[in-house]
Amino acid sequence: MKTRWLRWRRGVARHLPRTLRGRFVLIMLVGVLTAQLASYAIWSSQVRSSQLEQLDELSRNVAYSVASTMHFFRSLPFEYRHIVLDQLRNMGGTRFFVSVNERRIPVEDMGDGPEKRLVVDNFREILTDELNIDDVLVEFSRPETLRVYNNEVLLHDLPPRWGQHSLLMEPLSPPILVVQMELAPDTWLYVATLLPVPELLADNRWISGERLLAAFMVLLTVIGLSLLGIRSVSRPLGRLARAARQLGDDLDAPPLRETGPREVAATAAAFNRMQERIRDQVEERERLFSAISHDLKTPITRLRLRAEMLDDPRQRERFCASLDELDLLVKGALASVKGFDLHEPVEEVDPRAVLDELAEELALQKGEVTITGHAAPLPVKPLAFKRCLANLLENAVFYGRRAEVTLDDALERLTIAIRDHGPGIPEAQLERVFSPFVRLEPSRSRHTGGSGLGLGIARHIARAMGGEIVLANRPGEGLEVTIDLPRPSHVSAL
């Protein structure tokens, strides 16, 4: 059950808008629609209950009137019935249209639902009780299809003086209630009347045009107000997101404006304090390591002079080797701290031009580098970017004899792949080699490389630009280093 719930939550999350503005508007729309549906449901239920109560009382009153009319015609001698009908037609203004027919007139019954069932049941119950008969037909007909006589003449075709206008309420055309009962063999009493209830058998009353228009206007108002409200909230958050993305590139960027709602202003103030503290800590670290490096140079030089005075050549050589290693560690630590110059300005740099320049420098050292592909200029800190590529190319040439570089430029990202033909790196060591002072080749002499800081500095620079460096062994032989760098203009906003 828990796994199914988590799977459902992930599915819902995938279909939600990705922006804060979109989610806020979605919440408002869902809330308004739910409130409207609930209010309409309650209102409709109350109105329906009230209408049914009124319809029940009205239909029963009309049913008693029809029962009285039928009882009156049943009591008349046969030869007087047509005389009374003629008098009723000449008088006009009656609520009923009454005729006596030789057979039951077919009616195109219409409508369905609780309203019709209530009316029909009331008429059948009252007429059956009042007239002591079982065969009573109660139906509803449209005015344009209603037939009233033995020859099935339409109601519309009767003369106006016959009073049929009381059943015609154009252009409304409400349904006409028709009651037929057998007075005697081959004699049927026919009564047609109107129930003064608007939209008695109307369909789709819940989704009426007026309600749809009202709901549409409410939704438009909610969307407009939601967009205006969320804009004032999301704008400071957008500035905060951009400042956070730029924090690694430029710690000296101007502080955020501490404006907007109280929570947003407090967040901006906290971000500014964090940026200031990080800048102070980085600068303090640089000063500390610079001081350590400077202070260690004098004792190292003094120890080197004393080592040269040793009489034993073997001890002198071992002592100088240890001092060389100590000097290399000090310089490497300082290089690691200053691996990315925080105060270097960002400029548009052509990656292919930087790679070509590095390839020419390595060619002077018997290094073979081939480059394929081109890339549009990339906004970076030039010296740091060049150092990142130089460290990776030097490693590839040193350990893999030659390097093959491929540039894959896209609208949103730039990918640089560097492949060598060396022995590769054990899978368990692919992440460990990025740590400072980690070298798979155990020697630390000047003839076999540095102290294991090149890959760490390169990844530090790439991550500071919002990118990443990944190592992978090739199926045949060699190592593939992939540098993935985003283009700042296409970094997704909040």
Image: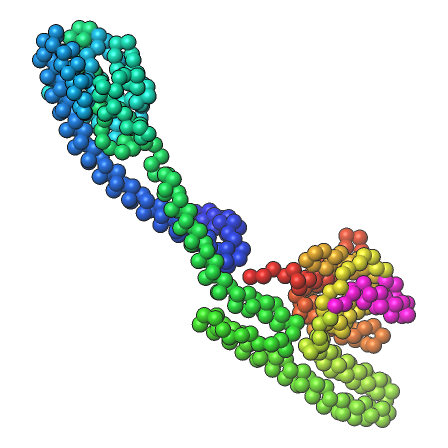
* Percent of width and height locating residue 239: 56, 68
Residue for point 20% across, 6% down: 186
Q: Is residue 361 above or below residue 161?
A: below
Q: Quadrant of residue 183?
A: top left
Residue drawn at (36%, 48%) of the image: 36
Vertical arrangement, residue 316 with respect to residue 489, above or below = below
Residue 184 vertical placement versus 449 (above, below) = above
Q: Quadrant of residue 131?
A: top left
Would residue 400 be counted in the magenta stretch?
no
Residue 262, x across and y down, in percent: 44, 72
* Magenta span: 348-369
Q: Is residue 404 visible?
A: no
Residue 412: x %, y % from top left: 68, 58
Using residue 190 as the reference point, say whether residue 482 is left or right of it: right
Q: Quadrant of residue 255?
A: bottom right
Percent x, y for residue 342? Answer: 68, 77
Q: Image point 19% across, 36% down: which residue?
A: 53
Report if residue 241 is visible in the image: yes
**61, 327: nearer the viewer:** 61
Instruction: Say whether residue 222 is left or right of residue 62.
Output: right
Left or right for 150, reference 459: left
